Amino acid sequence: MRDFVPLRYALALEMGATPASLPDSVGDMSSILLLIISIAAPWVVQLAPPRQRLIALVIDIAVLLLFGIFSGNPLGMWQFWIGLIIGIVSVVLYAQMGSRGPRRRRWEDEEEAEPTGEL
């Protein structure tokens, strides 16, 4: 597996720049960006309207492809998988918090109540 070097800096290395002259924060920033993208990807699909979820999934894949073109293959990076796991778990936990069971409607409560004779 090759070292993670963004395209811009790979070209700079080919043009004669030394690795010591490149900033160290380039790889760190790309890692943070990949982590944010992979955490947001499940939320983008979840928050899309049901008829547009396929389009949201295609857009997520397109963003990952663009990241792969300009920075490096995200599938081999641990930041991608950790972010994806965090995103999926957060969506599942959020969905579980919203499902408290079936709520009873007011008219169902009134039908089951015993008559008191009062109006």
Image (tube, rainbow, N blue to C red):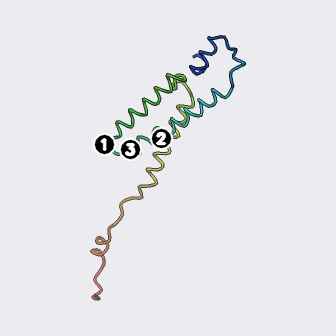
Instruction: Report which residue position mark 2 lands on.
Output: 88
Dot 2: element:
helix
Residue 91 x/y as whole percent: 46, 45
Q: Residue visible at 46% across and 31% down?
A: 63
Instruction: Report which residue position mark 1 lands on.
Output: 51
Callout in the foreground (2, 3): 3
Left or right placement of residue 72 versus residue 43 in this view: right
Label 2 neighbour load within 10 Å: few <14, some 14-19, many 20+: some
- Furthest residue in direction front, as rendered: 15
Dot 3: element:
loop
Q: Residue visible at 68% across and 21% down?
A: 22
Instruction: Report which residue position mark 3 lands on.
Output: 48
Eyeballing the image, is 115 above or below 49? Answer: below
Q: Amino acid at mark 2?
A: Ile
User: Is 58 in front, or is 93?
Assistant: 58
Eyeballing the image, is 110 above or below 35? Answer: below
- Furthest residue in direction right, as rendered: 20
User: Is 45 in front, or is 76?
Assistant: 45
Q: Amino acid at mark 1?
A: Arg
Eyeballing the image, is 23 above or below 54? Answer: above
Between disc 2 and disc 3, whose residue precedes? 3
